[in-house]
Amino acid sequence: MSPARPVEADLQAYVDGRLDAARAAVLEAWLAAHRGDGVRVAAYRQLGREWREAYASVLVEPVPRELLATLQTKAKAPGPRSLPAAVAALGAAALIAFGVSLYLAPSSASPIVQRAAMAHAVYAAEVQHPVEARSRAELLAWLSERLQMKVQAPDLRRAGFAFLGGRLLPGDDAAAALLMYEGQSGQRVTLYWGPEFRQARETGLVYAPGERGMRVYYWLDDECGYAVASAELSRGELHALAQMAHEQLEK
């Protein structure tokens, strides 16, 4: 009897090293036979490495001198509660420093690049169900309703890429969408829509290279953040598609 398909919690636990040896062995056998889930696990690991690299400096960041001086002054004050108060203040200072570092460490575009790369890695590898089973008109109307903005599928046929469909994705503060295209040789390109990444001033097209051949072009405007991703196309090929999408969505 073949093993049951693992739930998402099992995949996350495997990536984090929280499964016991027996369960991990069963899951590894499943991943070896199911490429889509294997790609998903690889994408989770890659995202974990990127976040650890982005925030590694926080772990060794010194406490500001002004805060240390304040803590030392309070620690010298009389009373049995001075030391606990100082410890609490030090913890608060560390949390403040950590929060500031989280805000400043990545650029404002980093999250959308990571989200787009992750979504592409997970869904572009799917063979049977890469997109929702809906007609083009129904899909775009549904995504527009969920994202609370008009979602359009740029026409990339001039570059040899046909529209396959799309998916609704979760975001931190708002829903997101993923549109997928396929080339004549089976290459897949995705367009990520992230309304939570909108900003007042448009950025224009920006290139963001990734590991293992992943490439992303993104831009942000006052309505949405957009990212075109591929693991199969060259930078020049992807730029042509991203530029085509940009011209149609920003006209």
Image (spheres, rainbow, N blue to C red):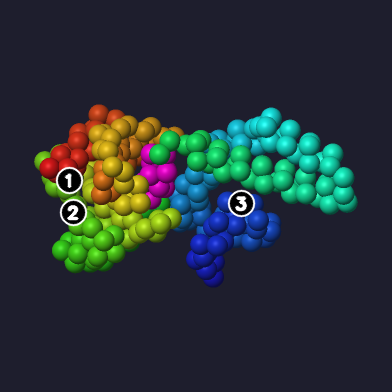
| Residue 231 as seen in the image, left or right of residue 240 | right
Whether residue 208 is in magenta: the answer is: no
Q: Residue at x 26, y 61 (%)?
A: 148
Q: Which residue is mark 1?
A: 249
First in sequence: mark 2 or mark 3? 3
Percent across and percent down for residue 159 are 15, 39
**If the image is split into quadrants, where does the N terminus sit?**
bottom right
Q: What secondary structure predominates along the stretch shown in magenta? A: helix
Q: Which residue is mark 2?
A: 152
Whether residue 106 can be seen here: yes
Residue type, mark 1 in image: Leu
Bounds of the magenta segment:
109-121
Residue 42 is labelled as: none
Residue type, mark 2 in image: Gln
| Residue 90 as seen in the image, left or right of residue 14 | right
Q: Are marks 2 and 1 in contact (CB under 8 Å)?
A: yes
Q: Residue at x 51, y 65 (%)?
A: 7
Q: Which residue is mark 3?
A: 16
